[in-house]
Image (spheres, helix red, strand yellow):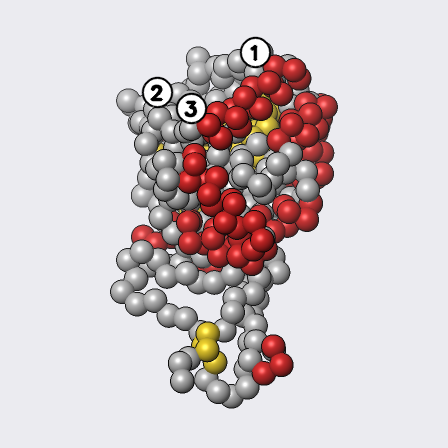
Amino acid sequence: MGDTHIPLTAIKGRGAASRLAHRFEPLDRGAFDDGWGTLQDGAAERVSAPVTQVTFEDARSIITGNDSPDIYFDHSINPYRDCEHGCVYCYARPTHSYLGLSPGLDFETRLVAKRNIAAVLRRELNRPGYRPTSLAIGTVTDCYQPVERELRLTRSVIELFNETSHPFGLVTKSSGVERDLDLIAPMAARRLAAVYITITTLDGELARKLEPRAAAPHRRLRTVRALAEQGVPVGVSVAPQIPFVNEDMEQVLEAAWEAGARSAFYTVLRLPWEVSPLFREWLGLHYPQRADRVMARVHDMRGGKDYDADFATRMKGGGLWADLIRQRFDKACRRLGFNRERFVLDTSAFRRPGAEGQHKLF
């Protein structure tokens, strides 16, 4: 008699349902019934809710350069590795493999915080050859994920940018950015700050499955309004677009415009490396009746594959269905008025910081 494998179940508050083996793992393990009645009467053993753990890291460098032609910023800063928001589609999940951890549950429960980020950033901004340029905060993992409430690493970065008049932009799914409006709003008035809020869908039930620990859609709209009312240039990211899953792009754009957003962008679903089996696993748990249709459409936009890393198509996809999404987005933006004016950050006011604490002497 063969082993009976225990079916996966969704875990409340988590995007992934398993600790999927990473691509460098020599062994892949799976649970199975050992004959002690764990599957009797359908009462399969449930995975206990994993607790979030935070490990501190002393980073050697903070500013990361970018030369990808399909990304709008030149340099980025990420105060955290990994993200408790648990977005199942997150393209950053495979980075956890380099730590020997699972891109599944480990990615959203075993976080790394760069506790010395402000000190290292101060040194980097003070280098003789440093020149300010387009710099984005939180491009890989959300800079306002829940742990930021206590650790305040993102705030320490913005405080340093305020001290040095260094321009920045950030993207988040969290209402936590409102905490730092006392810094962001005055900087925005000097053309030194802009914020993008990601709103994947207005459907709260879907958002709880896709992005279980991010702010609810209606709460993100309140954040857009709060930023706009304080004079902060605010945009909306309607990303990613997932065929047959989040189909309300136009409604999201309309709500974001009404709340005060004036710029917008989108991407289509990206499934690099381990994100592909994780997303398939998620589809099987939450939308099994449409899983095949979703993946068939993804393949239509990716040349018959789960993912294609070609710079020309990786963000927006290719083919008929990708073009239809582009047309929907473009028409909605033209009708509403998005992206009519480009907000350019001012790099001319930058002044180098002194050694840590030195500025307090004057």
User: Which image quadrant is residue 73 in?
Assistant: top left
- SS category of the residue bearing label 2: loop
Mark closest to the chain's N terminus, 3 or 2: 3
Q: Position of residue 193 (x, y in %)?
A: 54, 23
Amino acid type at circle 1 is Glu
Give x and y (percent) for residue 64: 35, 34
In the picture of the structure, the residue carrying the numbered disc 3 is 72
Badge 3 amino acid: Tyr
Quick check: marks 1 and 3 in contact, CB under 8 Å?
Answer: no
Q: CA distance from mark 3 to mark 2?
A: 18 Å
246 or 230, nearer to the observer:
246
* 10 Å crowding of disc 2: few (<14), some (14-19), many (20+): some
* Mark closest to the chain's N terminus, 1 or 3: 3
Side of 194 relative to 166 (left or right): right
In this figure, which residue is indicated by the disc labeled 1?
A: 341
C-alpha separation, residue under disc 1 versus residue under disc 3: 16 Å
Query: Quick one: label 3, few (<14), some, or many (20+) residues within 10 Å?
Result: few
- Disc 2 from disc 1: Cα separation: 26 Å
Q: Amino acid at mark 2?
A: Arg
Residue 19 image point, x, y percent: 44, 62
**101 w.r.t. 147: above or below:** below
Name the residue that disc number 2 marks.
131
Q: Secondary structure at mark 1?
A: loop
Check disc 1: other Cα within 10 Å, few if <14, some if 14-19, many if 20+.
few
Mark in front: 2 vs 1: 1
